[in-house]
Image (tube, grey):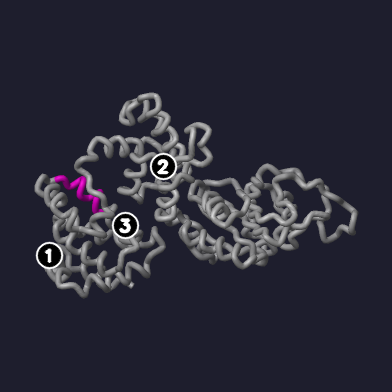
């Protein structure tokens, strides 16, 4: 998965941003009424592109006028372009899906490359000229496009090859951002679209929220996606959370085989198995956020797991801790102090594994600069010297690689 993503955004020379960073760019464009250079969010299915548009619009008091471009495959056949039409030549009956005069709105062309080329051309006038014959977009309207990258996983129109479209768009390659997802999942807006089924808007189901807080790397199962298996992503987690609430409503335990089958059908069997195992062992589990932000409150429990030889739980905890290093808002020095003490308490082989994972996890969180600052903070601590002695005995080459991270 990662290899194919690099090929795409490097081939087309576009920046990589998390969902949180993409949301900031949308908000910036709204505040400044930027009409030129229409935002185009590129990302894999379920990565959160649509959700951040909806979130940003709600926070700014804008309506989202949603157009699924794939539905317009033959609509524009034989319709002349706006620029070639004289006044009164062709008038549109404006559908409700388009912004009304004076309205604050985001005109959102989703799956823009799932339509045929002639249908995409229909929207040129709205992208650039902000009009279509007699219809004019209001001043407080931001146009945004979203699409999947052209890979073996999608049958799409190659609009990247259209230079006229390329120069009209501001491209952002969006990767799932756990922090933004977590903020959303903890709010009542998470199940806003499921209020009819649940009776009210609710946050993500607490058991699923706890699971993904502990295993943030499992929010998007890239390996399953590439292998054409059922895969976990922010969109499917919402569906699973809805099912969790409804299962409980009917008195069905979330570890029941019926519940497992529903989770497996939505998230895949691997994630469903992980959720059931998580619920079975929840009393032995430690919140990785506590480790990185206030390790003293978790240290004794970590030592107990070490004494019991619970290497599997410790390894999973270390993976979660590595992710939360890049999600926490605490000062780098505080994180470094807690992290090095945690590593000192782990068996050496798990410490080495955790350090080997750091560069990869930093890349997944678009946080290589933060990793560099964290590394610098680690190396200034006396406790790092103690850890380095331990590591030197096991793997001198690994230590040097970590110290030279840039």
Residue 150 seen in the figure? no
* Place of residue 164 in the rendered image (x, y in percent of width and height, measured from the top left): 70, 63
**Mark positioned earlier in the residue sequence (3 or 2):** 2
Residue assigned mark 3: 324
Between the residue at mark 3 and the residue at mark 2, the CA separation in whole angstroms equals 19 Å
284 up-or-down from 174: above or below: above
The disc at residue 390 is: 1
Mark 2 or mark 1, whichever is nearer to me:
2
Magenta-colored stretch includes residue 270 = no
Crowd around label 3: few <14 · some 14–19 · many ≥20 (10 Å) = many
**Mark positioned earlier in the residue sequence (3 or 1):** 3
* Viewer-nearest residue: 219 or 150: 219
Crowd around label 2: few <14 · some 14–19 · many ≥20 (10 Å) = many
**Mark positioned earlier in the residue sequence (2 or 1):** 2
Between the residue at mark 3 and the residue at mark 1, the CA separation in whole angstroms equals 24 Å
Question: Bounds of the magenta span?
Answer: 310-318
Magenta-colored stretch includes residue 315 = yes
The disc at residue 204 is: 2
The disc at residue 338 is: none
* Place of residue 282 in the rendered image (x, y in percent of width and height, measured from the top left): 24, 40
How many badges with numbers are in the image?
3
* Viewer-nearest residue: 229 or 142: 142
Q: Is residue 308 left or right of residue 214?
A: left
- Residue shown at 15%/69% (left/top)? 383
- Residue shown at 17%/47% (left/top)? 311
């Amino acid at each position: 998965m990662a290899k194919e993503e690099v090929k795409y955004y490097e081939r087309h020379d576009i920046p990589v941003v998390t969902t949180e960073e993409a949301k900031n760019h949308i908000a910036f464009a709204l505040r400044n009424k930027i009409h030129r250079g229409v935002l185009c969010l590129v990302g894999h299915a379920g990565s959160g592109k649509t959700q951040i548009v909806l979130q940003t619009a709600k926070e700014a008091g804008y309506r989202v006028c949603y157009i699924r471009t794939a539905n317009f495959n033959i609509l524009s056949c034989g319709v002349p372009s706006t620029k070639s039409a004289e006044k009164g030549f062709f008038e549109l009956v404006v559908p409700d899906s388009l912004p009304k005069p004076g309205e604050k709105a985001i005109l959102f062309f989703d799956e823009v490359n799932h339509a045929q080329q002639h249908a995409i051309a229909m929207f040129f006038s709205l992208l650039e000229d902000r009009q279509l014959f007699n219809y004019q977009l209001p001043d407080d309207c931001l146009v945004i496009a979203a699409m999947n990258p052209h890979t073996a996983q999608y049958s799409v129109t190659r609009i990247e090859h259209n230079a006229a479209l390329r120069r009209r768009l501001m491209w952002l390659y969006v990767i799932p951002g756990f922090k933004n997802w977590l903020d959303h999942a903890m709010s009542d807006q998470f199940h806003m679209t499921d209020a009819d089924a649940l009776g009210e808007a609710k946050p993500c189901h607490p058991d699923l929220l706890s699971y993904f807080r502990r295993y943030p790397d499992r929010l998007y199962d890239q390996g399953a996606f590439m292998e054409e298996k059922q895969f976990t992503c922010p969109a499917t987690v919402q569906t699973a959370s809805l099912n969790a609430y409804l299962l409980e409503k009917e008195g069905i335990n979330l570890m029941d085989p019926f519940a497992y089958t529903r989770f497996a059908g939505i998230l895949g069997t691997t994630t469903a198995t992980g959720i059931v195992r998580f619920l079975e062992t929840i009393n032995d589990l430690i919140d990785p956020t506590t480790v990185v932000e206030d390790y003293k409150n978790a240290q004794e429990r970590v030592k107990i797991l070490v004494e019991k030889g619970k290497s599997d739980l410790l390894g999973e905890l270390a993976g979660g801790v590595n992710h939360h290093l890049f999600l926490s808002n605490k000062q780098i020095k505080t994180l470094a102090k807690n992290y090095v003490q945690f590593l000192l308490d782990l068996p050496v082989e798990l410490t080495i594994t955790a350090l080997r994972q750091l560069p990869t996890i930093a890349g997944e969180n678009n946080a290589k600069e933060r990793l560099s600052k964290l590394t610098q903070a680690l190396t200034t601590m006396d406790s790092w010297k103690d850890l380095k002695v331990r590591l030197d005995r096991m793997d001198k080459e690994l230590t040097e690689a970590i110290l030279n991270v840039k």
